[in-house]
Image (spheres, helix red, strand yellow):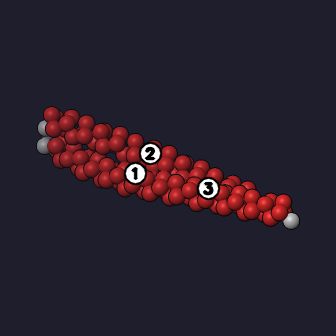
Amino acid sequence: MALLLCMVATAHAQSDYYIRKAQGYQREAEYYQRQAEGHRREAAYHLKKAESYQREVEYYVRKENTDKVKTYTRYVNDEMDKYKTKMRYAAEADDKAARYLKYAAEALERK
């Protein structure tokens, strides 16, 4: 009788362990989802800045001010690089979130 009670208690403890692990993985996934959203928001900002600088380029092309055209073209390129970087970070964070959700599902299967 005592052996059976001990086995049931052990099985319950293992079940709680995997539930807690799954919850931890889920929290990690939520963290990375928030990170990805933030990176996408920043990417949108950089894209908007690039569009603004592109309008400046067009203005200075009409005014035939080549120095300003070169400067603002460089600004456009810099902002587009920042946009691409932030989108890459967002994709990486999305991948991590998906990985942690998979870990959580696996932990729940073990319980």
**What amino acid does circle 2 point to?**
Tyr
Q: Residue furthest front?
A: 2
- Name the disc covering residue 39, or none: 1
Where does residue 28 sit, x and y in percent of width and height?
52, 54
Neighbour tally class for label 3: few under 14, some 14-19, many 20 plus, Cα within 10 Å:
some
CA–CA distance in space, label 1 to label 2:
7 Å
Label located before the other in sequence (1 or 3): 3
Label located before the other in sequence (3 or 2): 3
The residue nearer to you, when weighing 18 against 61, is: 18
Which residue matches tag 3?
21
Label located before the other in sequence (1 or 2): 1
Q: Quadrant of residue 71?
A: top left
Which residue corresponds to the image point at 39% horizontal and 46% vertical from the top-left? 86
Q: Secondary structure at mark 2?
A: helix
The residue nearer to you, when weighing 15 against 78, is: 15
Where does residue 72 sit, x and y in percent of width and height?
21, 40
CA–CA distance in space, label 1 to label 3:
27 Å
Mark 3 touches mark 2? (CB < 8 Å): no
Neighbour tally class for label 2: few under 14, some 14-19, many 20 plus, Cα within 10 Å:
some
Quadrant of image for the C terminus: bottom right
Where does residue 7 sit, x and y in percent of width and height?
80, 59
Mark 1 touches mark 2? (CB < 8 Å): yes
**What amino acid does circle 1 point to?**
His
Q: Secondary structure at mark 3?
A: helix
Where does residue 46 sit, x and y in percent of width and height?
31, 49
- Name the disc covering residue 31, or none: none
CA–CA distance in space, label 3 to label 2:
26 Å
- Name the disc covering residue 89, or none: 2
